[in-house]
Image (cartoon, rainbow, N blue to C red):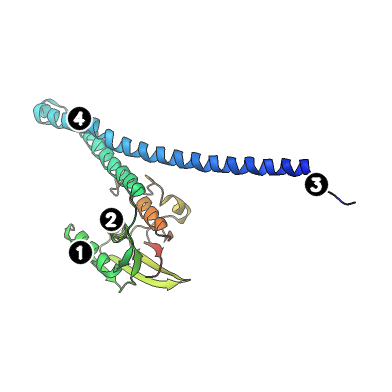
Amino acid sequence: MECTITESRKEDIQSMRNQLASHQHTTDMTVEAVSNELEALSYSISHDLRAPLRAIRNNCEWLSKRHAANFDTKESTLLQQITESSEQMEKLLDGLLAFSKLVKSDPRHSIVDMTVIAQKVIDELLEGETAPSSYVITLHPLLPAYGDATFIRQVWYNLLSNAFKYTHYREKREVEIDSYVYDGEIVYSVHDNGVGFDMKYVDRLFGVFHRLHEIEEFEGTGVGLAIVKRIIQRHGGRVWAEGKVDNGARFYFTLPKA
């Protein structure tokens, strides 16, 4: 049996295609609008909440200075907890603001000397350490990349500061930085001998405000790795991590060849 499509049926099919295309366009615009609104909201939240948080912290400081002698142990503890919580919230807002600014920024690409940037970040981090001699840092000559030097520096800072932080309890704190070419990309890695993590939670590492360790153990906001992921994705690269509990971690990211 030969099947033929009538003119009216062809018109119906074309009409359906037009509707689908229109729906897809509307969906894309809706997603973009929602994304823009979320970015604006995150900026507003991180910016506008600072005033009340600052008021809480200032009032706590005033109470501590003027009436600390009249507080019992429980009252002093509560006041300290309020102060510390407001300070932590400000750090979270700083992270959210940094993330929202990153989303709005346009990278400016050029040839980036990765070895120089990584070394400067290492020197900066070591300046803030009380026992820099406890570190064994191996920085192999890194392959140059093509990207935004300012953003790439932020990637190195976030990854290396994590390596420094999570090796805190090691007597010998080891960090190794390396690079190699694989499948047409340059792969960069930061390896440490710190506390590591359980691989079943690896998908949570690069989410905003996701933490695998308690704030009491290691300070942080849970934004650093999310920023790393966003920067690298905007450069056309990838990020991933490998780790084992109490046996260190290795973070990778890729960039186009220079």
* Structural distance between the alpha carbons of marks 1 and 4: 36 Å
For residue 161, the mark is none
Evaluate whether residue 18 shows in this view: yes
Place of residue 226 in the rendered image (x, y in percent of width and height, measured from the top left) = 38, 50
The amino acid pointed to by label 2 is: Lys
Q: Earlier in the sequence, mark 4 or mark 3?
A: 3
The residue that mark 4 highlights is: 55
Q: Under tag 1, what secondary structure?
A: helix
Place of residue 247 in the rendered image (x, y in percent of width and height, measured from the top left) = 38, 62
The amino acid pointed to by label 1 is: Asp
Query: Which residue is pictured at 14% across the width and 28% down the height?
Result: 63
Q: Which sits in the foreground, 100 or 177?
A: 100
The residue that mark 3 highlights is: 5
Q: Nearer the viewer, mark 4 or mark 3?
A: 3
Could you tell me if the residues under marks 1 and 3 are in contact, i.e. CB atoms within 8 Å? no
The residue that mark 1 highlights is: 123
Q: Earlier in the sequence, mark 4 or mark 2?
A: 4
* Pointer 4 local density, CA inside 10 Å: few below 14, some 14–19, many at least 20: few
